Image (spheres, grey):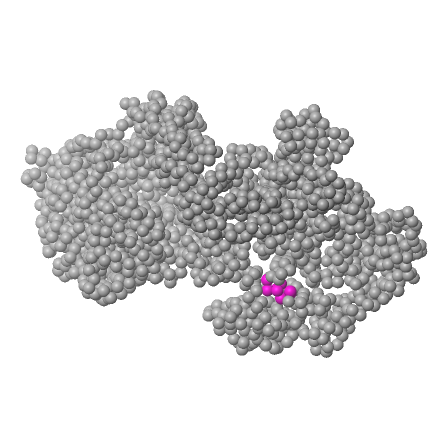
Amino acid sequence: MTSQDENVVIITGIPFNLSLARLKLVLYSYDVTPLSMRVEREQNDDDSTSSKSVIACMSSASDVLILLKRGALNCTVAGKERSIKVGLFTEESGVKEKNDNEKTLEESSKADSESDSEQEKNSQEGNHSELLRCVHCLRLTDEYMNGTKLKATFSRFGQIDQVLVSMERKFAVVKFQNDNDAYNALKTGVTIDVGKNTRILSLSLTLDLPLKDYNNIEKTVRSQQSSIFCTRIPTHSFNYDAINKTFIDFGPIIRIELHQSQRQPYALVDFKNPQSARKVMSCSDIFTPFGTVVVDWNNRETNDIRKMILNERRQKVKPSGAVTNRNYRGKNDRPSTSNNQHRTGRRNNRSKPTSRASSTASEPPMQANMQGLRRDNRGRPMSPPPGNSSEDQSHIRKQIYCRNIPEAFYNRNILMTHFARCGQVEKLYLSTSESKFAIVTFCEQSVAETVVKRGLSLPGAEKPLVIRWSNNAYTKQSSPSKSASAYGNDREPFHLQSVHNSDRTIIVSRLSAKMRTEKLQNYFLNNRRSGGGKILSMQELPAGIFIVFEDPSVQKSVLQREKHEVDRKELKVFSKTEPKQLEDRFIIMGIAENPDMTILEMFLENCDKYQNTPNSYEKIGRSQLLVIYDFRTCGNVERIRIQVDGKTLESQKLLTRPIFQTDCLKVVDLKEETSNNFIELFFSNVQRSGGKDVTFVDRQVAGSQAFVFFADCNVVDRIVARSLLGKLEVDGQKVQVSHCYNYLQIVSQLNNPPPYVPPTQPSSPSQATKEIPNLMTINLGQNFRIITTSKLFEELKTKFKVKFLVLESERSVTLEGDENEVELGADLIVTLSSEIVSVVFGATMNELKRDFVRFCLEHPSRAENFREKCQAAFNANLIIASVEQGHTKEVLLLFHSSGGAGAQQIETVVSGLIYLRRFSCEMKHVKQAGKKWSEVVFGLFQQGILVISKQGTTNLLSLSDPTSAQEKLRKCLKEFTTVKKEIVRTSELERVLFTIKYFNSSTCKLQRCGSDLQIEGTQHDLEFAKPAVLKFVENLKIQTMNVKEAHLQKILQSSVGVDFLKKSQNKHKIVILKCTTDGKKIPVDQKKKVSTKKKAPPTPSQQKAEKPHLVVYEGKLKTNKNVSVKVIEGNIVTFPCDAIVNTSNEDIKLGQSGGISARILKNGGSSIQDEMNKLLRTIGGVLFQGDAVVTGSGNLPCKKLIHTCGPSWKTQPTANSTKYLKSCVVMCLKRAEKSTFTSIAIPLISCDAVSGGDATVCSQLIMDTISEYFAETQASTLNQVNLVPTLKTMEQLTDTVRKFTNQTVFSCYGSIPPKLPRETTPTSTWSIFGMFAERLQTQWTTWTSELQRSVRHIPSKFEIGAHKLSVEILVGDITGQKCDVMITSTKNFEGAIINAIAQKVDISFKKELSDSLLRMRNPNVKIATTDAYSLPCKHLLHLNIAAKINEDVVTVKEALLRANFFGAKSIAIPAFGGSRLTGKQCAELTAESIKNFLEVISQPSIGKIYVVLFNTSFVDDYKSAFANFTIAASSASTSSMSVDGGQTSSSTNNKPSPETIEKLIFCGRESAHNHLAIQELVVYKTNLVTSKRIENDLLMNLGETEKLLKLVEVHHDVEIQLNVNKYVGQAVITGLRADVDAAYEVVFSTLHQLDKELTNMKFVQWKYCDICGNDVAFPLKSNYLLETNFQIYQDIGEKNQNGEMFLNSTSLKVEKKSVETIELLLALKDNQLAALQTVDFSNMILKSSGITLPIFRELVGSPRDAISLPRDWDDMNGSDVKQVPLQPLSVEYTQTLSMFNACGLPGGSTIYKISRLQNSTLYKQFHVQRSKVERKLRGSPNIKVIRRLFHGTSEDSVNSILTNGFDRSHAGNGAYGRGVYFATKSSYSHDYAIPAANGHRYMFLVDVVTGEYWQGRRDTTAIPIKAGSNEAYDCVVDIMAAPNIFVVFKDSSAYALYLLEYS
């Protein structure tokens, strides 16, 4: 059995005209099947007939055996029997059979072998330049442009022969001794050191050449490069438009590629011409709107061009046939070992190689032609390869050779674009030699094979490109046609669109005439509008626009859209199929008009080696012929077309082109009345015509002929095939259809028919021969018209007896006549033509008239009329001239150089022919006229009148007087410029407001006129607008919402509610109105009425007073002591000086970037901008960076404004920004000095968010420049420089100014610095600003003395009329403010202010303060009193501010009460806690304290409160706080609560109450919008309104609490509902969330205080004896106040030996006083107002209104009820609450800890602290509750009254429990009721001890009154009642049998003994 690799036979003696198809039929007849066949060789037989040999690969070994047994096969050729022979194909001899051709084949093989051996020998003896052992290096630094250093760098790869360095071109070449070393260097890569960084060199292999050749190669590379690399592009400018604008001035751009890399983005810009790229690279800097960019050559293009040049040189040096497989080896393709050995042996031994690799390079031609067949390891042929044969071959089979490239396309970027459409291109080389060609390397072999197989046609080119494999790929291959035909793969050229798959292409038809391609492109790029995406190409076809998308999914998305519409024109979009090349026909061009068909037929047969005859011919043009063959017998005719192309027939050179499927169907014999729509519908009907998807129908030849275009080319074939079966009937008429291959040529001939030449009939052949005329044709080109219309030409026609045939279409003149006459006439015409001069027309003419000339020449009829008038004028002035339209838009003037008239004189003659009329009209009126204006103008255009409107003027130009046309335009404008007003009646305001806001009208203006709508517009606009408005108003939907709830009323009247309504109506696009009870309708967005009177501009003094300017620092320049530099805080625009500097932009537009320019425009007026616009024209339209200009100041207080353009630090290098900033400062100073100014104000230039400058850097540069400038100009007129920074940059600038100046005055913001230190000691340095700390401490005395002289008044004064009190806000030093009482703010009575007062008054001040604190013996004291010493006040109070607002409000309130006790008329207070709180918090603290003070003292003695702030930064916060405070005071209830619960005197509210809202009106276009807005309002109200519940037994005492709750209701605008019975007291507070929270706090704190007072009254009752001798008890509050102060008197007063005491009336803190009595705010009776009473506890007397009354104290109840505090408690020191830490080794500590541990405290817990809790008030309350339960359970000794339990809680609740006890109002609904929970096990409470941020937990040990208990439930809210009794239980539990959890419902039932802090 024969193996598969031996199934190849050779068939010889085959007649030449026997085709391969017929040979297959012969083989089939012998029952054998060939897999593939190819022609191997042609030869001449003995009988002089041509024959050939064919190599065939059979399907099996059995087929080979059958043929070998036969030996010879019989076939019939041209009617004769021929015998062909079959033999087995072998490698050694080529053929293994015994036939007549054996000798010929052997001799041929031997000759080829000898030839190859000779070539191999020559290759060995020649030089070794083809060995790539040289490495080309780029990106070298100057340091490495040294041969020695480079040799040391590359020596690690191998031995180096030589290093060449080119300093001119900045490259080097390293020549290795071994090419392997060069390859290793290239593969490994080389890096060099550049400073601290490294750089990778650009390496490539090159030839071994001299340095001169390398330089020439680099020069050639640069001459061909047209692509550049661009980087350092900002992100906001990284787009195609910005880069295109930057480089378009250098030359036309082909393509821009944007690349996003991780390091920085870059762009590749490809120019059309290399000259443009060289022009860019010759520029030192490329300046762009976004800064300077970095450009360089595109290295990828550089390497590609260099490789191609080297390859071309290599081919010239290398002998033919010596090309090896290492050419164009890829970067990663390392040569094989055998090839390396072969090259090494050839270089060193000079001996012929014996390896197998060398023999394959010199195989015989017959074997070389067998490359398509695989071979085994013996060299025997195998079946054809399925893919690439080797790695090297796979690379070089990607490379093709291309020639016959048109000049217009001979550009690297253009060709790259076209070849890229076929597939991805790796590189492209363009030859610079005379023989223009290109070598293209594709990334994929399949793409290259497709292009070679099918060819390529460029758009607009007459012939396709000649494409074949590059010589580097097939060096021994025969001609492409033979090689291809052997495999049956005939070449099939194709057009560009054929390379696109049909799944990516569409065709768009039904385009309007005015539609631009750019608009269509943008439409199909927009995915949202069309579903389109990225477009590869767009091409205009007769049937529409052909579009190719990048992604196939985009085509599907576009086709799925139901409708496409552009410019209100619906488009038709179809999928466009790929046209296929027709293999049975082609077109011959250049053939004679009436050729001899016999000669043509023989010619075509001779061009076909099989001598096939065409089936038919079709004339499709004057010189074009369609030739059609029978494909079944002839096969693919591409071989014939290639043979015909370029040959000559009947003296005519023939050209050919392939034929593709056509999408055009030619239809003839149509009815003329048949419409195009009918034709389109007919051929779109598959059933009637077989067609579909018609894209375009064109009618020609009087309508009887039509051309129908389809989206699918196969449809045309189907219709034509159907017509052959039977004629088609269209509209009842039988028509003929056929393919149309030359539609454009037909249309061109119909539009431009050839000139008619009458036929001449000679009388006889001899006569015809004699009368052959003598003709001479002269092509005049653009000189045609000037010569043929001149008088000289007329003279020539009369002078010479010849006939002149003038052909305007060809711009030629033909002379016919006598030979001598013709030559003389032609010579004169040529001479005349050579003297014609061509210049650009209109150099000295008016621009409008120049446009008119261009307008005339654009249209043939206008051009003819214009030329006639011009020619008449030229002839009258004896001028030979003509005006012609050039190839571009330029107009050319042609004139005779010796005619005597120049271009200027000729243009004057032409200008005199043109009439110009103009009239004024505003452009907005022209736009309003719109369509009608365009119609009139278009009509004038048709009459030859040009209308140009610009800059408020309309110009009319014509060759006749255009006065009548001018009147037409005036009349048209009048209709659109007369403004009228009309009223649309409607009784509903909401409809009017909605229409004004949402009706879109660009032509009319809508405004409100009462409750009606007024429309204003021109008469023309009103005709269309009024009906639309009426319809719009009628269709509006209206809904109402009743407003009944008081909470909703308040929400809608508040600013928050109004803002919500505004947002709601904008969100839903509706209008909302508030309708009051009196019928008024108020829009929610109605603005307050503003006076229409024009306010006079503020004077400089007024502007100064509007916002003060503070001197932060002042000093003298060190370089010039005459110049003062100040740092100012404030608004620079209102600063009084001679000149103010404004930082502007380049176009000097105020207000664009906000900041200073916006304030200048606002305060100074628009006149400044007007002056700047005029100035801008004089400086070239731009203000450059670093320059400055001067303008007026408008309404500003300065004399002049200096505008400068600062640098942008973000978009340019730092060095450029530095020099521009310094230039700005110098130019501003120079401009000011030139105007003899003495002062200037400069901001911190370029230090903002837009410019991106750093404050420290900019301030340093500005001061450096100022110092240098004044050092050079000592006698400058400027003596004061004011620097005005922002608050953020104040610190940096001040610090910088100090370095350059000597300080004279320091005024930090005019007062105390903005922030005090958080913690200071009397001896520590006061740290302000951090960096200024030490300086400020030493300068404190100077600073305070300066501030004391003047406290700066801020115009902020607030009157509280109801209390006759005014609050005034000041900025300055509080120690310098005159007042009766001065209050200071400290932290623990220490800090900078204490040190400052001590330095200012007396050092004994500190000692007095310290002694006062020690005498009080209370660590929690909040207020201390000292003497005022020399301060401008009578009393001095010091407050300890804890920076906790709730606590500090009480402290400040106590201080105000004490000041009122002193009888002070005025007090001065600071910003309490200003160093630790924000401005807003400080302001709220102060306002709330004053408010609480006024609630206690309705008519205080204090009339003025001075709020003295540190700086202006808090002023706005205080203004806002007191403004709200004033409103609240004026709108508060007319009655306020007294101390004892009575009412104060009423005060009348002067401000009118807001009107009550009855309902809301919602108006919109849809009812759904109104409904959604109403729903949102309901939800909004629900979220704002809330409820809180307070449960307290004190609420059951209605007499004491009802008054309180009513006052709270009125004051906080809430509703309080009492639920009281004999078992529980509850109050529910309902209202807005903020009001409910405030009311809850008031009620809760008041009830807590009431509890204390009631508890006190149970044990002690104070009484006084009135003037009648009756004992009268003090009221509740007064009784508590007296008892509390008496306890302090007993504790402290008896121990005080230095004087009497002063007791605080509210917080009960003791201070030293020089009087013997105290004053308390007491009420003697319940119905009397509280007043200050003098109480003397030592004598037990009371002084009231000058009357002395005795007082006495009684204990209530039995002695056993008296409550004494535990003995183990520490001394309370007059305080109610105390927390005592236990010593860890004490007995109490050990016992308490053991209780926690014994009850399950988690093991391993860390104990931080155990504290004993001492609260006298809570202890007494607990004692009362315990005693009550004990008395109740006296008969039940087994019931425990007290249990010691545990309670775990969070850190936030600890302080509240310590002060107020356990409050069940804050408890939630637990598992056993709403109460306070306690556990018997500490392990259970541990889970509720929530860790704090530091991990610490807190647990209380509590005594709880448990008594009798009951089972708890979740819904239990109060203590349960016993069944059948009115008696209640004491608590509830979790388990009745063995309780673990106890829940109490009374706060007094539990007292916390100890607090454990652990983790």
Q: Is residue 233 left or right of residue 1091?
A: right
What residue is drawn where x is 42% and y is 57%?
Answer: 287
Please say if 1173 is above or below 271: above
Please say if 512 is above or below 353: above
Q: Nearer the viewer, residue 1819 or 1048?
A: 1048
- The image quarter in which residue 524 lies: top right
Q: Nearer the viewer, residue 1763 or 1783?
A: 1783
Q: Is residue 1472 visible?
A: no
What residue is drawn where x is 37% and y is 51%?
Answer: 1898
Q: Nearer the viewer, residue 1571 or 6?
A: 6
Q: Is residue 813 left or right of residue 1935?
A: right
Residue 942 x, y percent position in the rendering: 48, 33
What residue is drawn where x is 38% and y is 36%?
Answer: 917
Q: Is residue 1827 left or right of residue 1724?
A: right
How many numbered marks are there?
0
Q: Main secondary structure of the magenta part?
A: helix
Residue 626 x, y percent position in the rendering: 73, 42
What residue is drawn where x is 72% and y is 78%?
Answer: 349
Q: Does the magenta segment cover residue 442? A: no
Question: Quadrant location of the N terminus?
Answer: bottom right
- The image quarter in which residue 667 lies: top right
Please say if 249 is above or below 1609: below
Question: Quadrant location of the C terminus?
Answer: bottom left
What is the span of residues highlighted in magenta in the rendered image? 305-312
Residue 899 x, y percent position in the rendering: 47, 50
Residue 555 x, y percent position in the rendering: 60, 41
